[in-house]
Amino acid sequence: MEEYVWEGSRSQRNVLDTLSRMPGNAASSEQILQSPGVQEYRRAMLNLRNQGETEESISLYKQSVKSLLGVA
């Protein structure tokens, strides 16, 4: 199985696009990508894609998305 790479991925671009459009966000692209919420999402996405869909990996991914969007 091919290893999923975050850098330059569609997921990375989508996160950057979504968060940069959120009201009140004046952070640069680099600041957004280095933020704790994005790093948590990155880890969860890498785990999900590289280790496979398990109950734990799906739960971690779900929580990271909620946290990233501020709905958790």
Image (cartoon, rainbow, N blue to C red):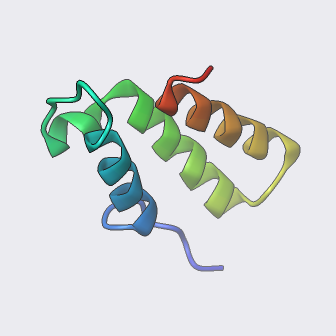
Lateral position of residue 72 relative to residue 35, left or right:
right
Lateral position of residue 63 relative to residue 22, left or right:
right
Tally of marks: 0
Q: Is residue 22 visible?
A: yes
Q: In the picture shown, does residue 50 fall above or below 19?
A: below
Q: In the picture shown, does residue 6 fall above or below 64?
A: below
Relative image position of residue 14 (x, y in whole percent): 40, 57
List the single residue furthest toward the top: 72
Q: Nearer the viewer, residue 33 or 46?
A: 33
Q: Is residue 33 visible?
A: no
Q: Nearer the viewer, residue 71 or 5?
A: 71
Relative image position of residue 17 (x, y in whole percent): 31, 53
Image quadrant where one finds the C terminus: top right
Image quadrant where one finds the N terminus: bottom right
Relative image position of residue 34 (x, y in whole percent): 27, 35
Residue at the image position 12 percent from the left and 38 percent from the top: 28
List the single residue furthest toward the right: 55
Relative image position of residue 70 (x, y in whole percent): 51, 23
Residue at the image position 16 percent from the left and 42 percent from the top: 30
Residue at the image position 69 percent from the left and 38 percent from the top: 62
Lateral position of residue 53 relative to residue 1, left or right:
right
Lateral position of residue 57 relative to residue 34, left or right:
right
List the single residue furthest toward the front: 23
Q: Quadrant of residue 38?
A: top left
